[in-house]
Image (cartoon, rainbow, N blue to C red):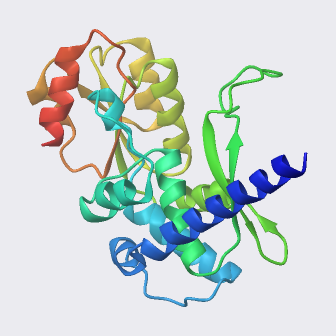
């Protein structure tokens, strides 16, 4: 038992040392330049809120790697390369891990949490822990994931392109954005369908086209700031290539 305790203590010490080395190697200046932050470097609630808003403004939610069958790497160097240097976005694990490295470098106490997404789920549903968020311990615990995102959507109206807008997922996204005062281009193959006409009644601009036609995607997405694209299942390699070509 004494040997096991000693071994556990060594493992913990090694893990702490690895985390400290990762934070020390993190390019904080490049990260702040990426999000346009030039404010205070003290671990306060106001600093946290400001950095989180800048992060939300500058870095898009993006999950194109799985769509294109590219690996998703979560180590600090890979995150810096993809999001900071290459100017791309990321999904919740990438975004929050990058943010945690930056804020730990400022002296924040950060804990990563696994969460269940209940949005649009039936009442009483127990979903998988498929979402990551961060907890910050200041004078009180602070979970910025919902607070800042909701505030940002409400106060920064912009234009968005939504694929599958007449489907379940795309329809929910379209309605939420319209409720927050955003402009939405609803991409659909059947702009005269009842579902499409209902979105038009709610304020969406209908954009006719098909995911199988790159030109129609490019034409419809002109002038928008973000693209919400539902993940396409395996076997749709042609569509994978079209989105890759569109991104290029």
Residue at (48% x, 76% y) in the render? 24
Asked which quadrant contains residue 127, the reply is top right
Where residue 117 appears, x then y in whole percent? 67, 34
Residue 96, compared with residue 128, is above or below; it is: below
Residue 117, compared with residue 211, is above or below; it is: below
Position of residue 109 in the picture relative to residue 196 (left or right): right
Question: Can residue 218 be seen?
Answer: no
Where residue 135 appears, x then y in whole percent? 72, 60
Which is more toward the observer, 94 or 208?
A: 94
Where residue 132 appears, x then y in whole percent? 62, 45
Question: Can residue 212 be seen?
Answer: yes
- Quadrant (top left/top right/bottom left/bottom right) for the C terminus: top left
Position of residue 198 in the picture relative to residue 137 (left or right): left
Residue at (24% x, 58% y) in the render? 86
Where residue 189 appears, x then y in whole percent? 26, 16
| Residue at the limit of the structure toward the top, as seen here | 235
Residue at (32% x, 36% y) in the render? 65
């Amino acid at each position: 038992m004494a040997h096991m305790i000693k071994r556990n203590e060594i493992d913990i010490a090694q893990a702490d040392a690895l985390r400290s080395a990762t934070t020390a190697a993190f390019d904080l200046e490049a990260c702040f330049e990426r999000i346009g932050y030039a404010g205070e470097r003290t671990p306060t609630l106001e600093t946290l809120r400001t950095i989180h808003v800048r992060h939300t403004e500058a870095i898009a939610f993006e999950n194109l790697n799985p769509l294109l069958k590219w690996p998703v790497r979560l180590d600090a160097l890979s995150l810096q390369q993809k999001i900071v240097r290459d100017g791309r976005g990321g999904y919740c694990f990438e975004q929050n891990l990058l943010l945690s490295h930056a804020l730990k470098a400022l002296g924040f106490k950060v804990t990563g949490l696994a969460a269940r997404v209940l949005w649009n789920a039936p009442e009483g549903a127990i979903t998988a822990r498929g979402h990551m968020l961060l907890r910050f311990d200041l004078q009180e615990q602070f979970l910025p994931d919902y607070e800042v995102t909701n505030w940002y959507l409400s106060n920064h109206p912009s234009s968005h392109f939504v694929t599958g807008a007449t489907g379940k997922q795309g329809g929910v996204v379209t309605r939420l954005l319209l409720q927050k005062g955003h402009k939405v281009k609803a991409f659909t193959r059947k702009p005269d369908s009842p579902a499409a006409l209902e979105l038009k009644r709610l304020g969406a601009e209908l954009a006719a086209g098909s995911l199988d036609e790159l030109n129609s995607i490019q034409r419809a997405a002109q002038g928008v700031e973000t693209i919400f694209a539902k993940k396409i299942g395996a076997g749709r390699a042609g569509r994978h290539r079209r989105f890759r070509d569109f991104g290029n």
